[in-house]
Amino acid sequence: MKYTRRRFISTLGAGSALIMASSIPGFSNNIFQDKNKKLGVALVGLGSYASYQLAPALLETSSCYLSGIVTGTPSKIDTWKNKYKIPDENIYNYDNFDKIINNKSIDVVYVVLPNSMHSEFTIRAAKAGKHVFCEKPMALSSRECAEMISACKNAGVRLFVGYRCHTDPFHKTAMNFKNTSVGALKVVQSEFGFRSGDPKQWRLRKAHGGGALMDVGIYSIQGSRYSIGKEPISVSAHEYKTDNVKFAEVDETMIWQMEFPGGIASSCICSFNAPFNRLHITAENGWFEINNAYSYGGLRATSNRGPVDIKPVNQQAVQMDTFCKSIVDGSESDADGSEGLRDMRIIEAIFKSAKSGTMVIL
Amino acid sequence: MKYTRRRFISTLGAGSALIMASSIPGFSNNIFQDKNKKLGVALVGLGSYASYQLAPALLETSSCYLSGIVTGTPSKIDTWKNKYKIPDENIYNYDNFDKIINNKSIDVVYVVLPNSMHSEFTIRAAKAGKHVFCEKPMALSSRECAEMISACKNAGVRLFVGYRCHTDPFHKTAMNFKNTSVGALKVVQSEFGFRSGDPKQWRLRKAHGGGALMDVGIYSIQGSRYSIGKEPISVSAHEYKTDNVKFAEVDETMIWQMEFPGGIASSCICSFNAPFNRLHITAENGWFEINNAYSYGGLRATSNRGPVDIKPVNQQAVQMDTFCKSIVDGSESDADGSEGLRDMRIIEAIFKSAKSGTMVIL
């Protein structure tokens, strides 16, 4: 759906859109605001990604800035407060988070919590009238994704999923490869994996939505889908485990293939116990590869013609600026909740196929 | 089975082995011959591989030489005769081939025919008392492979399959990677494919044993098996077709994974319609890759530590010399008929899995 301002307004019902919008409790009314004003972003969850990628990126963004934090660890507050000049009234914990509804300097809530908390905090943020950036994977299930989409729609706020590759120039080149006179696409290969460290981390707990597929496999689902530009029609998957203790609750290595319309295929690997980091697209008359495909930096592109010169960007800054632009001008996003839901349905099919040993039709 | 001279002799029954051996009509008695004498090899089928790889290689081999040819195309004879100084009495066609039994200057028959003819000519060569080198894939089915093994055993001749990578130094490095302090192996990826040209070639005909899996997929079965050093316990496969006309009879692209003991996996692609050529081995703490893995030359090896310096060899020459050594000293070969049979059983399982959409247990 093209998310135009007109459509957005129409979802609010008849009458004066401005009056309607401002009459929704806590509605921060960003969509009508001064396009030159930076949107205030509150990070929910101050783990590694928030600390070392998102917060620094918010110093480089042109359309938003770090205006608040939400944390369950009081000891982290002072450091963040001082480093990013965050006023006390913009600092929340998980209990008083809903009071954010009254905070006009926070326009967007960026959910960077363990996967099992994405749904709850997205819905609470929506109810507080805040737009939501939610990290991938969007949630634990397609049911949760649907609830999140519905909550945001009902609250009249936008929902984006943290697909940083969508706006990365290396991956945009991958998306465009099929249009570069290389003949028909045949196969996309994508692998992402690393050796997970701390055995106590939430990514190894099933209840928190851990496991390789949810965390890193999703990049290959994405890479396949945007390189091919179509939706898969079936998946065949198999799970491999070499360490039954560390990976007792979650998938260690998952290998799967996806069938796309017209006989195009993708072959994917994700792992929490072995290093992989590649997106390789094969067409009739050429290929394109990103090696270190899914890292935050250090991406390198090569094609059958040799190295491809692409200027890297701050992925997180570009992603957030792009989301903000979409909020401000009411334009559609290819990283919205429906995109997160599509991936989650594929993830569910992969788990189902791996469990049954049978191809699953999507 | 260790194929010692003693065992070989014992298969001939009681009494004087020398007398027994020489009493078998046409038995060329190579195993007892002067180890310094070069074995005579007759090529059966003078297609591209025989013309441009095997015959030139037989000028470089130290333990064998091109002593005869068998062809169904009389027009080819003069060129070969002149180029390789082959006497008229060592030139056969498919009809009079069995008379090779009386030719003492031919010790080995190298079957380089379309796949559908491997079985027939291997068995006829065995009955003529000749050792056999048979190109891969060994035959059309595991039943044929078993018949070929049996025929050679009954005739007291050796049978080898043209697995040139077994003796290639790049692939020997791949086989040894698991022993190089890189931690446990996790995943092997292997891809081999190219765009097939002439739509009339036998490789596109089902009756001739065509198709990508039989022709190039077998390299990835091999690459996975010798890199991991174990036998797969299940396969999951899917066939992809983008051109239903050209590939009406045979598989165009096959993607499959194999599960190995201990949770090790391999993920493979073969294609007759897209370029692939890679063997990549991932262990806990490192990786090793051959790119241009399966070409006759131009192989390049890299590991997580950088480029790996390996001196290339003439694959076909080394392969044939190694087979001849095994014949002369009666030693076991890792490229014998049983190895060809193992691959054929996996190929059958891959086809079965692709057809059923279900994992097949081996």
Image (spheres, coloured by chain):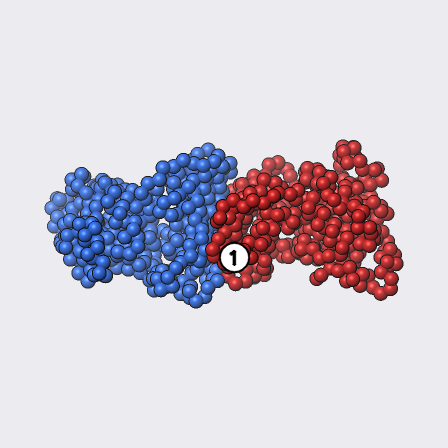
Chain colours: A red, B blue
**Measuring 88% from the left and 56% from the top, which residue is drawn there?**
A23
Compared to B212, does A312 lie above or below?
above
> Taking B47 as reference, is B106 left or right?
left
User: Splitting the image into 4 quarters, where does residue A177 fall?
Assistant: bottom right
Whole-percent x, y for residue A91 in the image: 81, 39
**Measuring 46% from the left and 64% from the top, which residue is drawn there?**
B243
User: Splitting the image into 4 quarters, where does residue B102 fall?
Assistant: bottom left
Q: Is residue A360 visible?
A: no
Whole-percent x, y for residue B310 in the image: 38, 37
Q: Check the residue under mark 1 and report the chain it is in.
A: A
> Taking A35 as reference, is A345 left or right?
left
The one nearer the camera, B165 or A356, is B165
Compared to B95, does B87 lie above or below?
above
The one nearer the camera, A244 or A95, is A95
Label 1, on which residue?
Answer: A181
Whole-percent x, y for residue B317 in the image: 28, 44
Compared to A224, does A197 lie above or below?
above
